[in-house]
Image (spheres, grey):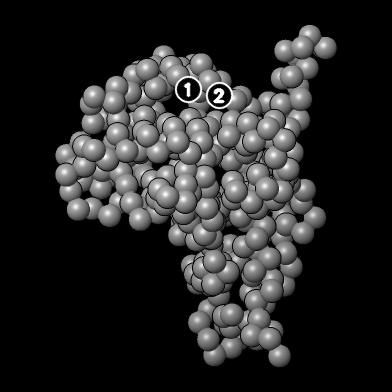
Amino acid sequence: MKEGDLGFFMGSNGSGPEVTPDNAIAGFLLSREVEGCSQATLKTSKYRIGKLFQHLNETTPGLSLAQINRWHVESYLVWIRNKGCSPAYVRSNYVVLRTFFKFCLQENLIQIHPMRHMKPPKLPKVAKPFLSEEQRDQLLAICPPTLFIGARNAAVVWLLWTTGMRLSELANLQLSDMDWEAGRIKLFGKGSRERYVPFLKEAKKAVWRYLVYRRDDFPCLWVTEERRPISKDGIDTSTQRLVIRSGLQGEIKDLHHIFRRTWAMRQIRAGIPLKYVQMIGGWESVTTLEGYVRAMDTDDALSAGWV
């Protein structure tokens, strides 16, 4: 007999604790952690599930976990959409909630999955932009290597351009992750999965220029101007300021994602098979990359005057 057959928690008729949203969420997060989900994913999941129950407590006080039905979930998703949340945000909430209720059903915390007949919210097919070499150079133009901040920001730009790594992966880099001789960088992506990306000459030169300024013993790659370790949010804030100073804020909405898309586009255009781009870039499936290919085909057609 599987552990799930007995139920992760027993209800009020059993000897275990009563099934409440709090202990159901705790069980779900524990299950996801065992599966290898990152702490960032667990934090996001906890927040989004918690917001559903907060909304239900305000609109339908006294509603138990087992009483939640499709109408309650759909009403919540419509509510966050009407608050101005993006279609992608609404859909991501749908995915988290559906996975949560699937767990509850498997663990006998509920008898019926409230979302079993729900279809995922549709996402508008909007072509996402890529970053041109001219825009990259515009960012680098305000990163003078003669200044610490300039050298550090230039290293960030070149690493993003040549590897397509995620913001979290970039922020968590350690000096020991940089293999200068083999020309590769070790990353820990989603779910702490290890992979390697190329450490190309442009990035090597930029990182070397930045490290010349280092006068500390910290093992992390990135430090502040005061020579203290910098957080992921600090890196994000620094790069967003870079976009504003470059005058590209009207063209670039999410610098790190645009760099990642652009890196993938450049590999695909160079003839590298999708499965290798997926492996090096750390995507879980090729679906996202296939979307980039469609966007590239459209751009190419427009550039050539075919449409």
Q: Is residue 241 left or right of residue 304?
A: left
Q: Which residue is mark 1?
A: 136
Give how far across and how far down residue 53 sits, in percent: 53, 56
- Which residue is at 34% across, 19% downward? 142
Q: Quadrant of residue 242?
A: top left
Give me the residue at 60% from left, 25% from top. Answer: 130
Q: Nearer the viewer, residue 266 or 126?
A: 266
Whole-percent x and y of residue 115? Answer: 73, 57
Residue 253 visible in rendering: yes
Q: Is 298 displayed left or right of 159 in the figure?
A: right
Q: Nearer the viewer, residue 177 or 170?
A: 177
Q: Amino acid at mark 2?
A: Leu
Q: Position of residue 82 (x, y in %)?
A: 60, 33
Work out which residue is located at the far top of the displayed protein and give it: 305
Which of marks 2 and 1 precedes in the sequence?
2
Residue at image x 50%, y 82%? 17
Looking at the figure, which quarter contains the C terminus?
Answer: top right
Name the residue that disc number 2 marks: 131
Marks 1/2: CA–CA distance: 7 Å
On the rendered structure, is 97 left or right of 229? right
The mark tally for this picture is 2
Give the amino acid at mark 1. Answer: Arg
Kindly indicate the quadrant of the structure image that contains residue 272. Answer: top right
**Tag 1–tag 2 contact (CB < 8 Å):** yes
Question: Which picture quadrant has residue 151?
Answer: top left
Local secondary structure at mark 2: loop
Residue sitting at x 32%, y 38%:
208
